[in-house]
Image (tube, rainbow, N blue to C red):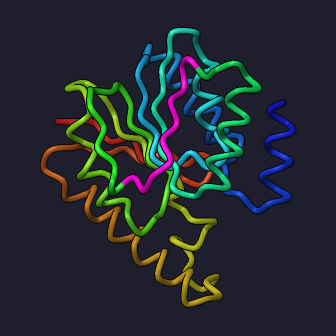
Amino acid sequence: MLKEMEEYARENRVPIMLPDGIDYLCNYIKEHNIKRILEIGSAIGYSAIRMALVNDDINIVTIEKDEVRYNEAVKNIHKFNLDDRITIILNDALNTNIDGEFDLIFIDASKGNNINFFKKYSVNLRSCGIIVTDNLFFHGLVKDESLIKTKNQRGIVRKIKEFITFLDNNTEFTTEYIAVGDGIAISRRK
């Protein structure tokens, strides 16, 4: 069923994590015994499902604002019988308030709002928790701006660079950059 989801994502141009990125994240979750996860940006539920499959006692809250993707995610979560462990919310993450604390917050949504997501949801992070952010390479465009073809891409690259600067200058968190998938950041409280 995971292969079917990957094919659906490819055919419908739905961005999901690259294979080595999601593998790295799932291994990290397993090695660090992470149990409660908040995901910003469900898309079709692929990464939430992959993370939930790491261990039977993992619970995930995930937020998606696109109704078509939300409905596809609900279907996929149900196919994997994960309705009791993955709670999906249809709403804009910037307009959603979440109660409780999480071991891991995974940001994989609108790149232009990474700083806003980070600031808004870091209050929901347990003291020893981490924030993981995906797509810091943005298909190689962040490192090699000569590859940029559109004004939209240029704007996204600028926002990602602003986010990296925000992480580098953050006095509350320390961040490690991992060159897997499309580039991920792992931020821990100091």
Is 155 situated left or right of 161 in this image? right
Which quarter of the rendered picture does the C terminus lie within? top left
Is 2 situated left or right of 133 in this image? right
Q: Is residue 115 or residue 69 the one in the foreground? A: 69
Q: How many marks?
A: 0
> In this rendering, is residue 187 above or below 111?
above
Q: Residue furthest left?
A: 171
Q: Which residue is pictured at 67% across the width and 30% down the height?
A: 77
> In this rendering, is residue 148 above or below 60?
below
Q: Is residue 58 or residue 181 the one in the foreground? A: 58
Q: Which residue is pictured at 35% across the width and 62% down the height?
A: 164
The range drawn in magenta is 84-93
Q: Is residue 91 magenta?
A: yes
Is 69 situated left or right of 137 in this image? right
Q: Residue furthest top?
A: 56
Could you say where residue 22 lies in the image, as x and y percent from the top left?
Answer: 63, 37
Could you say where residue 148 lies in the image, as x and y percent from the top left?
Answer: 61, 84
Q: Which residue is pictured at 54% across the width and 26% down the height?
A: 86
Q: Is residue 54 or residue 137 the one in the foreground? A: 54
Could you say where residue 98 lies in the image, as x and y percent from the top left?
Answer: 30, 37
